[in-house]
Amino acid sequence: VGANATVGAPCPVGHFCVEASVLPAPCRAGTYTDLLQQSSCESCPAGYFCLVGATGYATNPCPSGHYCPENTTFNRQYPCAPGSFNNATGVRSNTSCHRCPPGQYCQGSGLSAPS
């Protein structure tokens, strides 16, 4: 090995390195890794969202008015439909979006409470 040779390094957190990688690649949106030297990234669990290069998911719970199935890529990707709302965070599916109660209306999507 010559004096100017470069060496590799462990693949950093939030990235993955397949065989023969020249550079680490950031985890795709909807995935994460919180470990070094990974060849792939994990699916973001339901109830959370994971941005590109995510090093974890616990600090990214799904916001109220929305739901986040597995592999959600950003916080407002799946809003509750018009006519419904959801006042909780970390919701995993649209079954947690509540129908607007009688005597109130829910105009628009992604509501955390009736309009």
Image (tube, rainbow, N blue to C red):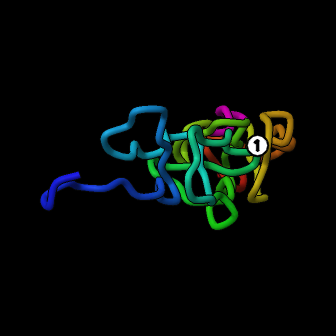
What is the quadrant of residue 63 in the picture?
Answer: bottom right
Q: Position of residue 9 (x, y in %)?
A: 40, 58
Would residue 88 be visible to someone looking at this image? yes
Q: How many marks?
A: 1
**Magenta stretch encompasses residue 84:** no
Q: Is residue 29 above or below residue 7?
A: above
Instruction: Tell me if 25 is positioned left or right of 94 in this view.
Output: left
The residue lying at 51 percent from left, 55 percent from top is 14
Q: Which residue lies at the image location 74% right of the left edge and 45% below the top edge?
A: 45
Range shown magenta = 79-83
Is the magenta region chiefly helix, strand or loop? loop
How many neighbours does mark 1 have within 10 angstroms: few (below 14), some (14-19), or many (20 or more)?
A: some
x and y percentages locating residue 19 in the rendered image: 47, 32
Question: 30 or 98, which lies in front?
Answer: 30
Left or right, residue 82 beside residue 13: right
Residue tagged 1: 46
> Residue pushed farthest front?
1
Residue 108 visible in image: no
Of all residues, the one furthest to the bottom in this rendering is 59
Q: Amino acid at mark 1?
A: Ala
For the residue labelled by badge 1, is the local secondary structure a helix, a strand or a loop?
Answer: loop
Q: Residue at the location (55% across, 38% down)? A: 77
Q: Foreground: 102 or 20? A: 20
In the depicted view, which residue is nearer to us: 34 or 90?
A: 34
- Quick check: 46 left or right of 63? right
- Residue 78 position, x and y percent, is 62, 36
Q: Picture coordinates of residue 92 (x, y %)?
A: 79, 43
The residue under the point 52% across, 54% down is 54
